[in-house]
Image (cartoon, rainbow, N blue to C red):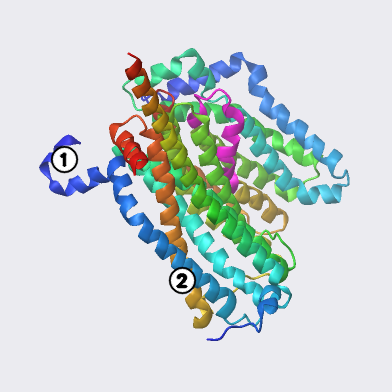
């Protein structure tokens, strides 16, 4: 098993098929990264909501 | 269903599995390891497939898109069944958690179906000379995307979460019954209208050097799917259970550390 | 059949008879939209004949889709659907009755009117019998599948467009075999094969769709 390309330029060009292969790779990675970051952001937002609720509850208790 | 839990201990795991809290804590423990495994598998597979696998005799380097296209297509279809099964469990046992899994599976499945279509189109240009061909598999994939979009749209159309869950679970089940019929009829339709001589790669006779990285990528995609499904479900759990005491404790603990 | 099938069939037919304008609109839509085809593509009969089977089938599908929305809507609004839901009898038989009535009001007129459109779109002579036969079976399938979507969206205020999103992918096998029946007859092949598959689909749909629609009504229209 050998590396199929002589240098980076050849790897990028892929004998003319580079644009297609790399578009597929970049778009796939972008979608996959989005699939991971989206729920993480949602989780964080939900936790922030809970924290705000708790803060509000303790504040109103303190006033009363 | 109470008597079942009392009578047979074998049902306990099932009910514990239905508890969002248990799910959140357990997945929290092994999610880092699974993510690491996913990264390793996807990284290895991608470098292996893109750099080291020998190029295809007919298609040249463009065939390397297979390492993204095939795993994405696999998971797109498997994801629909996962979604439908989760929905069915929700309908039958009225399990909150499984509705959450179903709801989470829909956007992931739709994204993977889109990826399968997109990579297929980009692959088609150098191989077939065109981005889009009404090939049986391409058409079935497109219909699968429509099915996913229907479930997503139905889910968000209801104001009441419960009704939305039940409605999209039924739709997912109806879709599951239909998928084999759709695939068969599209296949039949394609043989009827067979245009020119366009054939996708003959997968079974793949050289081992090409096949091994594909296997790694497929495994990697399965792990990736599991990771994203967990992440989406965990976010959904937090959102849905924000009033419960264990989530509050969790947030307080998170603030202190 | 004391299970409510005939009751609801007769009731819905009577309702349609009292409101003929509403019942006729899918048919009018079907005819009008088929008139647009020669205007949009070509009046040349040779080219029209080529696409006629597909066009007629697609338009029949759209016309059925338009009317599916109203399948349970009026019952939902006036409360009679709720009454049906709390009654002890099996829900799927009344639902099947309603679907049958819906087919007799929309699918059947479309089927009967299709030869006229065949003439207008210069469909070859050997295509008429298979077209009528396939439309008769196929619109039945469309009504049954559409009923599931209508049941799922009945409680939504703007369910119409969503309904078409939901059921359109499920319609695809029907349109494939429907237009293939006509096409293979025109091409001089035996057309009983695709027609038989259409019949099998109809049989399966009669068995499954009322159950699914009944379940959907029970689970989503009452919160």
* Magenta stretch: dominant secondary structure: helix
Q: Is residue C211 at least partly visible in the picture? A: no
How crowded is the residue under tag 1: few (<14 C-alpha within 10 Å), some, or many (20+)? few
How far across and down, in percent of the image, does residue B247 sit? 33, 36
Q: Which residue is mark 2?
A: B216
Give the x, y percent position of residue B216.
Answer: 46, 71
Decide if residue B244 is on the left or right side of residue B122. Answer: left
Write down the quadrant of residue C170 in the picture. Answer: top right
Determine if the magenta segment contains residue A32. no
Please state the chain letter of the residue tagged with numbered disc 1 in the rendered image: B
Element at badge 1?
helix
The label on residue B4 is 1
**Labels 2 and 1: the sequence-earlier one:** 1
Drawn side of residue B92 relative to residue B71, left or right: left
**Residue lying at 38% horizontally and 38% vertically, measured from the top left:** B238
Which residue: 64% across, 82% down?
A: A5
CA gap between label 2 and label 1 equals: 42 Å
- Quadrant occupied by the N terminus of chain C: top left
The residue located at (50%, 77%) in the rendering is B211
Q: Please tell me how crowded label 2 is: few (under 14), some (14-19), or many (20+) other residues with Cα within 10 Å.
A: many
Disc 2: which chain? Answer: B
Residue A20: quarter of image: bottom right
In the picture, the quarter occupied by the C terminus of chain C is top left
Q: Is residue A12 above or below residue B22?
A: below
Q: Position of residue B9 (x, y in %)?
A: 13, 47
Front disc: 2 or 1: 2
| Image: magenta residue range | C149-172
- Asked whether B110 or C16 is in front, the reply is B110
x, y percent for residue B17: 27, 46
């Amino acid at each position: 098993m050998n590396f199929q390309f002589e240098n980076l330029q050849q790897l990028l060009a892929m004998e003319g098929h580079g644009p297609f292969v790399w578009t597929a790779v970049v778009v796939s990675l972008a979608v996959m990264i989005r699939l991971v970051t989206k729920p993480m952001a949602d989780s964080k937002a939900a936790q922030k909501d809970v924290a705000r609720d708790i803060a509000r509850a303790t504040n109103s208790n303190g006033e009363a | 269903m109470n008597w079942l839990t009392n009578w047979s201990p074998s049902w306990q795991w099932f009910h514990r599995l239905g508890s969002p809290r248990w799910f959140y804590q357990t997945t929290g423990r092994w999610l880092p390891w699974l993510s690491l495994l996913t990264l390793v598998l996807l990284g290895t597979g991608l470098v292996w497939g893109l750099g080291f696998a020998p190029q295809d005799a007919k298609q040249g380097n463009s065939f390397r898109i297979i390492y993204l296209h095939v795993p994405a297509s696999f998971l797109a279809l498997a994801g629909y069944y996962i979604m439908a099964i989760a929905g069915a469990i929700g309908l039958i046992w009225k399990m909150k958690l499984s509705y959450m899994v179903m709801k989470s599976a829909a956007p992931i499945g739709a994204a993977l179906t889109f990826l399968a279509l997109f990579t297929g189109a980009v692959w088609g240009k150098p191989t077939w000379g065109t981005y889009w061909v009404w090939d049986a598999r391409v058409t079935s994939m497109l219909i699968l995307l429509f099915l996913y979009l229907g479930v997503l749209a139905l889910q968000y159309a209801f104001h009441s979460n419960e009704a939305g869950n039940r409605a999209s679970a039924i739709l997912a089940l109806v879709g599951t019954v239909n998928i084999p019929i759709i695939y068969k009829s599209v296949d039949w339709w394609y043989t009827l209208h067979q245009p020119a001589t366009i054939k996708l790669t003959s997968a079974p006779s793949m050289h081992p050097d090409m096949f091994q990285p594909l296997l790694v990528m497929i495994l990697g995609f399965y792990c990736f799917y599991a990771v994203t499904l967990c992440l989406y479900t965990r976010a959904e759990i937090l959102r849905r259970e924000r009033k419960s005491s264990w989530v509050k404790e969790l947030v307080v603990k998170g603030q202190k550390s | 059949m004391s299970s409510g099938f005939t009751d609801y069939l007769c009731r819905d037919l009577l309702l349609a008879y009292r409101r003929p304008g509403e019942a006729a609109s899918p048919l009018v839509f079907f005819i009008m939209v088929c008139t647009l085809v020669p205007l949009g593509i070509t009046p040349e009969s040779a080219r029209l004949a080529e696409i006629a089977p597909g066009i007629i089938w697609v338009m029949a599908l759209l016309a059925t889709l338009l009317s599916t929305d109203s399948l349970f809507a009026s019952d939902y609004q006036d409360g009679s659907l709720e009454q049906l839901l709390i009654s002890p009898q099996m829900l799927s038989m009344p639902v099947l009755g309603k679907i049958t009535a819906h087919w007799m009001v929309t699918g059947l007129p479309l089927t009967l009117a299709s030869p006229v459109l065949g003439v207008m779109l210069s469909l070859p002579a050997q295509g008429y019998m298979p077209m009528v036969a396939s439309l008769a079976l196929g619109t039945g399938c469309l009504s049954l599948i559409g009923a599931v979507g209508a049941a799922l969206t009945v409680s939504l205020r703007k369910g119409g467009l969503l309904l078409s999103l939901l059921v359109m992918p499920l319609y695809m096998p029907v349109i494939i075999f429907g237009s293939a029946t006509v096409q293979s007859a025109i091409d001089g092949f035996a057309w009983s094969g695709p027609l038989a598959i259409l019949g099998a689909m109809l049989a399966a749909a009669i068995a499954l769709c009322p159950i699914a629609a009944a379940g959907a009504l029970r689970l989503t229209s009452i919160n």
